Amino acid sequence: MIAIIPILLIGAIFAWLDSVTIVIAGGTEVSFTTESVSWGTGSVTVGGTTCTLDTEGTTTGCTGFTTVNAPLVIENIGDNDVKLDLKSSKNADEFIGGTGSTFKWKMTAGEADSCTDITPVDYTNVTKTDTRVCSTFYTLTTKDTLEVDLEIVIPSDTTAEAKSATITATAT
């Protein structure tokens, strides 16, 4: 035998939801999208005193080096506008050596309005300590790149050997 007993519920169900909290952290990240420069192998032209190379297509007083017409390119790939600092692992004496060597950089917005307060805009000696090159480096897709042109002067008394230096970008 099956008994059916009607059940009557009287009352109310209450639920309180005070708040829901979520924190989504934005990422701060920059990346070298063009991350190396190589002029190859060469020398100061016989009888010359210096060879000048830059990433704007200059090869003056040089023999054998490849012309490079492409700067390093840094892109803000994070979610935040950042301050951008650069430093080199070596100065001119440590990188090139010889008498009167130079190792310089200059900055240019890769896309219009990518960066406020870009400095230096003319070739200036690289530094081994963090140097502010952009006070606000934007993250918008249409304005988020910075170009770093490099210039080196190789004197004729430089030691013949492979040479390298590292440029480090720090975003805060």
Image: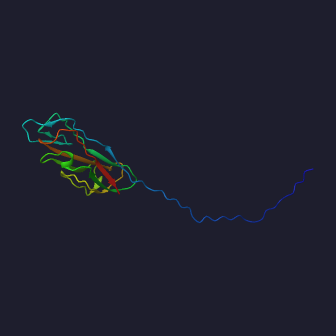
Residue at 57% across / 64% down in the picture?
19
Q: Which of 43 and 110 is in front in this view?
A: 43
Residue 95 in the image: state x and y as whole percent: 21, 46
Residue at 83% across / 59% down in the picture?
7
Judged left or right of residue 4, residue 80 is left
Judged left or right of residue 97, residue 29 is right
Residue at 33% across / 48% down in the picture?
75
**In the image as oriented, which residue stretches furthest toward the right?**
1
**In the image as oriented, which residue stretches furthest toward the left?**
47
Judged left or right of residue 138, residue 106 is left
* Quadrant where the C terminus is found in the figure: bottom left
Q: Which of 156 and 10 is in front in this view?
A: 156
State the count of labels: 0
Residue 150 in the image: state x and y as whole percent: 21, 46
Residue 119 in the image: state x and y as whole percent: 23, 55
Residue 117 in the image: state x and y as whole percent: 25, 58
Judged left or right of residue 84, residue 55 is left
Query: What colour-coding does the image apply?
Result: rainbow
The quadrant where residue 38 appears? top left
